[in-house]
Amino acid sequence: GTWALLATLPAGASSAQHAGVDPFSTYCYIVKAVRDGGGEHSLSNRTCRITDYPPVPQFNYLRTVTVPGTNEIAIIDSVDTGAQVRRYRLQRSFNGGPWQPLVNVPGGGGPLIQFTDTDVLTAERSYQYRVVVDDSCGNEVLTSNLGNSILLRAEAGLDGINRLSWNGYAGWAGNVGGYEVHRSIDDGPFQLLQVNAPLDWSFEDDVSGLDQTGGRFCYFVLAR
């Protein structure tokens, strides 16, 4: 292409920077030394550089969103380790509201990154999450799939039946295969009670025959 003046530097300068270059382009440079007052000049050799853009991530997959404890949600994110990333930004939404930034994790980790969100009310709300990826230049290049926490509700009926209901899990690349319902009696070990179909988000547990126990029944639901 046509030569263009990039910069005019003082006599003591020995380096320069060229900002705002286009990726995957070839730039050639020469230095022209001009005698003070004009007239005579001297040219350097020509050197050329290709502006290769650092590799960007090809995927970012939110693997699981789970509730490991009271008012705590763990988010597992699968990242492309072959890319150069400046940061991973976890964002959260509640009840269809705007996405709110939670935490940034520097690039270079993986292949799995775990986030923990403790500013939550897991017994009252279901939360939705996503991860936004910034490339090595700080540009937003990729957004993960969405994942949500499961909110389980239980109601003890006077007829001796505990009625459970929950919201479906969304976000996996494949469909949910089903929901496992687990129960603990009087703080004992959890046992599998039932495997529900993917679109069946409720369960009735008849505990009328367990009147000899302390009456403390705890449940959790596992999407698989």
Image (cartoon, rainbow, N blue to C red):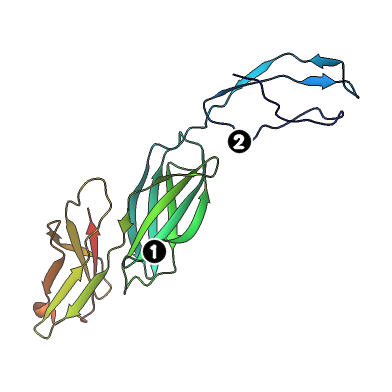
Residue in the image at 69% along x and 15% along y: 46
Q: Nearer the viewer, residue 63 or 85?
A: 85
- Residue 35's place in the image compared with 85, above or below, is above
The N terminus appears in which quarter of the rendering? Answer: top right
Q: Which residue is mark 2?
A: 20
Q: Nearer the viewer, residue 7 or 22?
A: 7
Total marks shown come to 2
The disc placed on residue 220 is: none
Amino acid tagged 2: Gly
SS for dot 1: loop
Nearer mark to the viewer, of 2 and 1: 2
What is the secondary structure assignment of the residue under circle 2?
loop
Q: Residue at x 37, y 40 (%)?
A: 59
Residue at which label 1 appears:
98
Tell me: residue 85, above or below residue 124: above
| Residue 144 x/y as whole percent | 37, 48
